[in-house]
Image (cartoon, rainbow, N blue to C red):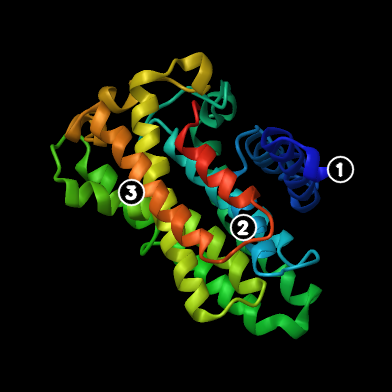
Amino acid sequence: MVSNMSFKEKQIKKVQEIEHVLQKYLPKQEGYQKLIMEAMEYNVMAGGKRLRPMLMKETYRLFGGEGDLVEPFMAAIEMIHTYSLVHDDLPAMDNDDYRRGRKTTHVVYGEAMGILVGDALLNFAFETATKAFSMYPEKSVQIGKAMQVLSQKAGIYGMIGGQVVDVASAGNAISKEILDFIYELKTSALIEGAMMVGAILAGATEQEVQVVEKIAKSVGIAFQIQDDILDVTSTAEVLGKPILSDEKNEKTTYVTLVGLEKAKQYVESISMEAIALLQGFKAEDSFLEELLKSLIHREK
């Protein structure tokens, strides 16, 4: 029974369920343009923590959500996250040759196809999310609100906005205020989008959705600071991507700004704030809380 499973076993099972959802919503590889579908699958099914769709599903369950209404959005947010990684790896951006332990898209398919794969995944993400309207027409208002949140958190007021400031700041020393802004948008925004969409689709109140947004913001910032720490303390084998890439790209991070020990303290305190807020919802299942805690101590 699930209740007797360890957290790790539950997590593996949930990742498998998410991957089944992703396979279900990926396009069939057919037609003259099937190369793009193949490249989309190469990226989406490359593995990874599936953190965003997992947070979405668990938040959906936290507020009593049942059924498959959330599934198109789970697939959509993973496609959005994946497209951002594909574009991040391009020569014009981070110029990384490996991601999740295998060659990046531009290395396998060429730079032009790398750009197009990212474009395709972003467009197809919204095409996928809109399938919820025909699945549950009676929930169109909630679906519309969820679409609005997803669009905003992925765009210029969210992930892309953070990415813009990040790219513009490369090679320059920046303040903690600017760094926090980058992290809040570049990383937190999509995590906020994931958890907020889950809450909205389950019928949470506006006030509850606002609390969820605060939890997700803290989780996202802690997650990104942990990323900074791992870039210095981990190995390429464990991470599945190059280490010291922040140093290579002359990026200001929490480690360069406040030092390794203080960065670790920030991760701990920010994460504890998020967990305290989450505990206010008195969840029946502790998995979501365990998941947030696991992000603090992750090694990859």
In the orientation shown, which residue stands out farthest toward the right? 1
The quadrant in which residue 296 appears is top left
Residue that numbered label 1 is attached to: 1
In primary-sequence order, the first of circles 2 and 3 is 2
In primary-sequence order, the first of circles 2 and 1 is 1
Q: Helix, strand, or loop for circle 3? A: helix
Residue that numbered label 2 is attached to: 56
Q: Residues within 10 Å of mark 1 (few under 14, many from 20)?
A: few
In primary-sequence order, the first of circles 3 and 1 is 1
Q: Judge by depth and name the residue closer to the eye, 205 or 100.
A: 205
Are the two marked residues, 2 and 3, in contact with CB atoms closer than 8 angstroms? Answer: no
Three-letter residue code for mark 2: Met
Percent coordinates x, y for residue 105 in the rendering: 56, 31
Q: Helix, strand, or loop for circle 2? A: helix
Residue, x 76% and y 53% (percent of image)? Answer: 25
Three-letter residue code for mark 3: Tyr
- Calculate the distance from the C-alpha at mark 2 to the C-alpha at mark 3: 20 Å
Q: Judge by depth and name the residue closer to the eye, 174 or 115.
A: 174
Percent coordinates x, y for residue 207 in the rendering: 48, 78
Q: Residues within 10 Å of mark 3 (few under 14, many from 20)?
A: many
Residue that numbered label 3 is attached to: 183
- How many callouts does the rendering have? 3
